[in-house]
Amino acid sequence: MILLHAFIPRLLVLGIAVLSLAGCTLGPDYERPEVAQSDYFVEAPPGWKDAMPADGFRDDKWWELYNDPELNALIERLNTSNQNIIVAEAQYRQAAGLRRTTWAALFPTLQSSSDYTRSGRGSSGGRAATSGGGYYYIQDSGSSNSSSSSSSSDDSDGDSSSSNNNSSGNSTVITKNYDIGLNTSWEADIWGRLRRSLENGRANAKASAADWAAVRLSQQSELVQAYMQLRVTDAQQQLLDRTVQAYARSLRLTENQYRVGIVPRSDVTQAQAQLKSAESDAIDLHWQRAQYEHAIAMLIGVAPSEMSIAARETLPVLPDVPPSLPSVLLERRPDVAAAERRVKAANASIGTAKAAWFPTLNVTANGGYSSSVTQGLLTVPNRYWSIAPQLSWTLFDFGTRLGEYDQAKASHQEAVATYRQTVLTSLQEVEDYMVQLLTLNREAITRQEAVVAAQASSRMMENQYRAGLVDYTDVVVQQTAALSSERSALTVLVNRLLASVQLIAALGGGWDGNMKLDLAELED
C-alpha cells in the first residue's frame, strides 16, 4: 500500500497533464468519396434506385424464394461447413484482433515483477561490508584460511558466505537480493497517431467483415446455381428418356411395316439412327449431372463420394421480380461496403504518416521494494520509484517520413479509385442481369409456343406416315424439331433461374432492405 500511495498519484498527475495536451488529431477527416451513379436503372421497373453502403450480413434467406426445401437444407450446411467461408471468418477475426490491439495502445501498460538474485564477487585481502548489513574478511595472500561473520543476525538469508582459495589467498563473496516492483509505460497520443491507427483498424475490421459477407453470398450463389443446373439436367434427362421411349415405339412400328413390305429398309435405318442419337444424348447427361453434384459437395465441405442428390421431377420455383424495389443496391452489396471501408482505412493512414513528423512523448515509471533480506522487505527503507518522461523527435531521416506520407496518399487515391470502380461494376452487373432476365422471360413465352407447335406438327406427321401419305424422313425431321424445341425451352428455363440468382447476388441478396449487424466487434 505504501508503494501505491507513493507511486500511483505521481503517475496520475502526470497523466492528467499529458491528457490535457492530447486533443490534436492530424490528417484529413474521412468523407465518403463521390461515385458516378444515377437515380434509376435503365432496365429496372419503376421505383429502383441506389443507396449508400452499410455493414453486416443479410437477415433474409433469399434462397427460400425458390420454394425448395432440399435447397434450403444444402444452404444451411454451406453456411456452417464451407471452407472458403471459414477462411473469410478467420481473416475477419484476425482483423478484429488487430483492431483491439490498436485500441489497447491508447492506454498505459502495467507490469509486475518479482525476482531473486544470487551473485558472487572475488577479492583478495581486507574486510568489506555486505549489502545485507554483514561483513566479510578478505584473506591476505599468505593466509591459509578465511573467516566471515555477520553483524545482522535477524535473518539468516542476509548472511554472506565466503570461500577461500588456499593456494592464491583469494576469496569469493556470495550476495543475495530480493526485488518486488511495478512498472508502467505509456505513449501520450498528442498528435492523434494512435487514434488514427485505431480508426484504420476499425475500418479494416469492417472491411474484413464485409469480405466475409461477400464470400458467403458468393458461395451461396454458386451452390444455388449448381443446384438449379442439376435440377434442369434432371428435367432434360426425363425429356430424353421419354423421347427414347417414343423413338423406340417408332422403330418398332417401322420394322413392322418393313416386314409386310409397306416401307423401305431406309425407313428402319433412319429410325434406328434417330433412336441411338437420343440414347447417346441421354447418356451424355450423366457426367454433367455428376459434375454439378460434385460441385455442391465441395461447396458444403464434404467429399464428392459422400454426396448423393436423388433425381426428381419437380423444378424450383422461379421467383417474380417485384415491380417496385427500395433503394438498396449499394447498401446491400458487401463488396461495395468493403471497398468503401478500405477508403476510410487509407484515409486514416494519411494521418498516421503525418503524425510521424512530430515529437513522441513516452512516459515510463517503476517502483517497488528491494533488499538483500526477506524480513522487512515491504518497508519504507527498501522502497524505490522513478518516473521518466521521454520526448523523442526524429530531426532528419533522409526522406523516410516523406516517402511514407506520399505512399499513404497514393494508397488513399488507389482505394478511392477501387471503390468507384466497384460501384460502377455493381451497377453494370445489375443492369446486365436485369436485361438478361427480362429478355429471357419474353423468350420463354415464344419458346413454349414453339414447343406446342412442334409437338402438334410431329403428331400430325406421324399420323400421315401411318396413313402412307409422307415419307419417314418427314417424320424424323418433325420429331427432331419437337425435341430441339423442348430442350431449348429447358435451356431458357435454366438461364432464367441462373439470371435470377445472379441478379439477387448483384443486389446483395433478397428483395427487401432489412440489414442485420450481428457482429459486436464492429461497434465503434
Image: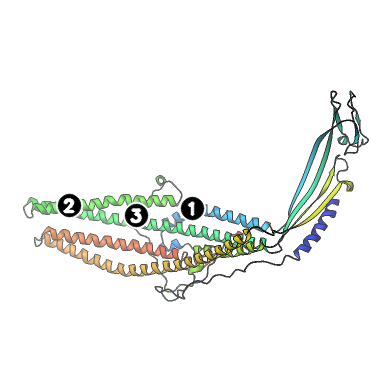
Q: Position of residue 198 (x, y in %)?
A: 64, 61
The earlier-in-sequence mark between 2 and 3 is 2
From the viewer's perspective, tell me whether residue 413 is left or right of residue 318. right
Q: Are marks 1 and 3 in contact (CB under 8 Å)?
A: no
- Check disc 1 and give the amino acid type: Asn
* Residue at 87 percent of width and 33 percent of height: 160
- Check disc 3 and give the amino acid type: Arg
Q: Residue furthest left?
A: 261
Q: Position of residue 48 (x, y in %)?
A: 45, 74
- Check disc 2 and give the amino acid type: Ala
CA distance separating discs 1 and 3: 30 Å
From the viewer's perspective, tell me whether residue 395 is left or right of residue 167. left
CA distance separating discs 2 and 3: 29 Å
* Residue at 47 percent of width and 53 percent of height: 77
Q: Residue furthest right?
A: 151
- Colouring style: rainbow
Residue under label 3: 312
Q: Are marks 2 and 3 in contact (CB under 8 Å)?
A: no
The earlier-in-sequence mark between 1 and 3 is 1
Q: Position of residue 509 (x, y in %)?
A: 47, 64
Q: Position of residue 185 (x, y in %)?
A: 74, 54
Residue under label 1: 84
User: Which label sits in the foreground, 2 or 1?
Assistant: 1
Q: Is residue 385 visible?
A: yes
